[in-house]
Amino acid sequence: MIVFGTRPEIIKLAPLVRELGDAAYVVHTGQHYDPGMSRVFLRSCGIERVDLQLHVGGLPRAAQIGRAAEQIAEAVTRFEPRYVVVQGDTNATFAAALAANAAGVRLGHVEAGLRANDRRMPEEHNRVMVDHIADDLFAATEANRANLLAEGIDDERILVTGNPVVEAVRAQRAGAADADVLAELGLDPDGYVLATLHRQENVDTPENLLATLRAFTAIAASGWPVVFPVHPRTRAMLASLDATHLLDALIAEEPLPYERFLALAAHAALLVSDSGGIQEEATVIGRPVFVVRDSTERPEALGSFTRLVTPQELAPAASALLGAIGPALARLATLPSPFGDGHATARIAAHIRAAVSPRPEES
């Protein structure tokens, strides 16, 4: 049983859903429930079947985890899976891990071992707890494996696979026709900035949110159009602050289907985001990212593809990079992604198949 609840989980588990096919039940908790973040996104990632759709989105964190864990436990009883798969660090991930652990069903955690070493982040709590109750830990990198070993987790539970985001991006980019997407927005390749913002520390803190939006406005005023797909959480907070006028200077879009987002990302001179997934995706498409956060659980890309910036640093840092963007893009084009070779899903699927195959005494 493959369980997900948010857009990033869909991206990284979609290849596994396709690889396992009818051998896997698919459960969506509804943590992301906006159509652009869920239904449209499932379709753009090639997930044609959801066996159980839950509706826990919009609840406070504790209620969301509790409600989802209860309903996933009922699904485990109903479907009787021999294996449960979760990914990352969301509330859906933690809820499904609790349900599988309580039922005694073998649990695999895709993208195990990420650590920002920042306990203020709800995601950090989720990922640590899931790692410590999972049976199989699918670590993307050797650094992730080292994090797990340092916490006393048995090496026999860890398998370094690479990150499925590599094959997810490559599959979406194969044969992509991007010219129409850029033309619709009046953009030139390498001539604009693509930005996203959704994390609690940025969106729920008015000072950070307003400073970041003002930095976007300054970048746009300097002659670099800023495309900004607005997360529902971000739009709601701007409305509550009576600050939606800060979107006026930007190309403000609704959340984008994955293929459209990647088309824009692949030709942006600079990405600005607080997303972990975008830090990974950028290494596959060879684009620089300014990460609007104090810390990152993906240090493998720091100093090459990614850089941490504060909202206050963002505009001047962007100005400096964009002033010499040609050489920067040429350098990144020569670098491989630190997140794997594009075969993570095959490794994970092979391990799962071996784990659930009948033992001799069961034959």
Image: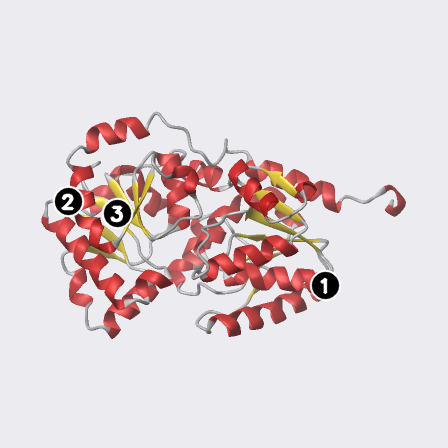
Q: Nearer the viewer, residue 312 or 361?
A: 312
285 vs 13: above or below: above
Residue 103: mark in rendering: 1
CA distance separating discs 1 and 2: 53 Å
Residue at the right extreme, as displayed? 361
258 vs 96: above or below: above
Q: Mark 1 falls on what kind of element?
A: helix
Residue under circle 2? 224
Q: Earlier in the sequence, mark 2 or mark 3?
A: 3
Amino acid type at mark 3:
Leu
Q: Nearer the viewer, residue 231 or 115?
A: 115
* Disc 1 residue crowd, few under 14, some 14–19, many 20+, Cα 10 Å: some
CA distance separating discs 2 and 3: 10 Å
Q: Nearer the viewer, residue 179 or 229?
A: 229
Residue drawn at point x = 51 percent, y = 63 percent: 91
Q: Position of residue 268 (x, y in %)?
A: 25, 40
CA distance separating discs 3 and 1: 43 Å
* Disc 2 residue crowd, few under 14, some 14–19, many 20+, Cα 10 Å: many
Which image quarter is the C terminus in?
A: top right
Q: Position of residue 165 (x, y in %)?
A: 47, 42
Amino acid type at mark 1:
Ala
* Disc 3 residue crowd, few under 14, some 14–19, many 20+, Cα 10 Å: many
Q: Earlier in the sequence, mark 1 or mark 2?
A: 1
Amino acid type at mark 2:
Trp
Q: Position of residue 162 (x, y in %)?
A: 53, 37
Residue under circle 3? 194
Q: Nearer the viewer, residue 80 or 351?
A: 351
Q: Earlier in the sequence, mark 3 or mark 1?
A: 1
